[in-house]
Each structure stands twice: as structure tokens, then as C-alpha cells.
Amino acid sequence: MLWGKRVYRKKLGHVGDFCAICRKITANKVEKRTLRRAVLGIPVSAPLRITHDKTCCDCGTQTGCYPSYYQEYLRRLPKHISVEALSARTFPDIYQRYDGRLQLEQHVYINPKTIGTSQRYELLQEPFDLLSSEVDQKMAQGCVDWQVILTFILLLAAPVGSFYLGVIFAWPVQWCVYTLMASVLILGIVALNQISLAKSRWVRRRIFPRLSRAVRPLLPTDKELEIVFDKYTRQRKRIAHRRDKKALLNMVHKTPITTATTMAS
Ligand SMILES: [Zn+2]
């Protein structure tokens, strides 16, 4: 890019913070992003926008964060450091800051069915909201997996294949042309379908395991999950494509409950 706006990233280090996908306090990597005008990659303006993101070291989910919460960043995460020790150094008042949320998580862990209906739906929707931007970002970049690549290789090989079939079976030229047109048409339709399916495969592989992990402790019923899923489907969010609903429901019920609330000692 010769000139325009560019995001400059700076890794700040590790902190303890709450992850709503893991539903507990975890180690996180914090990154500062500064938007500036740039010419030939060289910044030429004051920061236009500064944001901070944290990436959970357990689940890999990236969300916004508040740098004012942190006392310091650990450039390198010491081996075997507990999340409690990390939080004590980097986010000393984490238990006060998240007191209400951690008590709620304790409630979820002990008896999720006694949580009020509206709060249950808020908790069920939270991971959809958090992961939706990651899905949208990926969809904008495009999803290409081996099935898509294979289909395009076959599409490119169609002219050669038609020619060889014509030679082997001594077909008239028209037959070769018809075979070529039919194979390109069929493979073109298959390719378009595969591009669409690749998005679903990526969402099921990369997003649904985290989504399931986040909602599973709530012991949601199929009905509750369907209500939340359908809401995002109506909003045309790619995280909730109609075709993927059954896959998510199945995955949620098969996901073990592995999270446990971290409470102040
Ligand atoms: Zn996490």
C-alpha cells in the first residue's frame, strides 16, 4: 500500500483476565493496535484510534480489553506460573473487579438451572456475540480448504480430461466439446457449493467447539439453543447459518463440562 490508513500492532505481554468463553480467569496476551495514516508503510500521522485486545491462552479467543485494569504486563509467561499468581502481579484487583461475574459463574457451576430465564439467555448469547466478529473477519478473508482446492483442480483439469477421452475413444470433436461444457458446468456448480460449504466447515471446526464449551455449563435445552441460534440466523450472522444448527446442538450435548470458576481465596 502506497498510502492510506494502517494498523500498527504491538505486543504488550501477558496478564490474568476473565475469559467469557472459558468462563474463568485465564492467562491472556495483550496487543495494542494503533491506526495511523501511512506512506509506504511509514506512519505519518498521530494515532487516529488506539484499541487493545486480549487473546486467551486457553481457548484462543480475542476480545477487547481495558489496559487501565492492568498493573503490568509480563513479556514472557514464566513456566508453571498459576493464573492466580499471574493475576496478582498483573491485575491485582481482578477479584473485586469481576466479583459479580465470578459469583454468577459459581452459580452456573453449582446449579445452572436455577438462574433466571433472562439471565440464562444473556449468558447463552454472550459467546455468540464474542465469536461472531471472528467469523465475520474470516468470511471477509475467504474460506479455502482442501475440498475447494480439489474442486478447482478438477475444474482446471476438465479441458485436458475431455481431450484425452476424445483421443482414447476416438470421439468426434463435437462430443469432446459437449463433454467439456458439461464437466465445466457440473464442476462449476460443485465449486460454488464447496465454497459455501467451506464456510460451514470452518465455523464447525474453529468456532463451534468454543461456543459449545462456553454454553455447556449452562446445561441448555435444545429449545433454548434453538431460540438463541434462530435469533442470530434472523440477523444474518454467519455464525448461525441455518445449515449448521443441528451440528451445534449435537456438539453442545457431547461437550464435557471442564470449566470451574476461579474465586478469590
Ligand atoms: Zn478462553
Image (cartoon, rainbow, N blue to C red):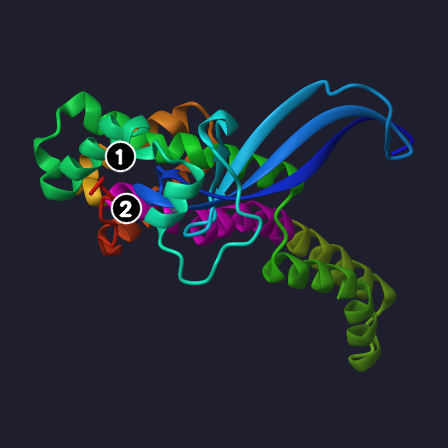
One can see residue 221 in this view: no
Please, what secondary structure does the residue beneath circle 1 have?
helix
**Residue at 21% across, 37% down:** 105
Q: Are the residues tagged 1 and 2 within 8 Å (C-beta)?
A: yes
Q: Which residue is mark 2?
A: 249
Considering depth in this image, is 20 or 43 the residue closer to the camera? Answer: 43
Highlighted range, magenta: 189-216
Please, what secondary structure does the residue beneath circle 2 have?
helix
**Residue farthest toward the bottom in the current orientation of the protein:** 168
Q: Main secondary structure of the magenta part?
A: helix
Quadrant hosting ligand 1: top left
- Residue 48, horizontal then vertical, whole percent: 72, 18
Q: Is residue 108 toward the left or the right of residue 138 in the image? A: left
| Quarter occupied by residue 45 | top right
Considering depth in this image, is 184 or 93 the residue closer to the camera? Answer: 93
**Mark 1 Cα-neighbour bin, 10 Å: few <14, some 14–19, many ≥20:** some
Q: Which residue type does callout 2 highlight? A: Leu
- Residue 262, horizontal then vertical, whole percent: 25, 44
Q: Please tell me whether residue 225 is drawn above or below residue 188 in the rendered image.
A: above
- Residue 62, horizontal then vertical, whole percent: 50, 39
Q: Which residue type does callout 1 highlight? A: Glu
Task: Check residue 212 for magenta coloring.
Answer: yes
- Residue 109, horizontal then vertical, whole percent: 16, 43
For marks 1 and 2 on the same chain, the one whose residue lies earlier in the sequence: 1
Looking at the rendered structure, which numbered label has been put on residue 226?
A: 1
One can see residue 83 in this view: yes
| Label 2 residue near ligand 1, CB within 8 Å | no
Q: Please tell me whether residue 44 is drawn above or below residue 173 in the rendered image.
A: above
Q: Is residue 2 toward the left or the right of residue 197 in the image? A: right
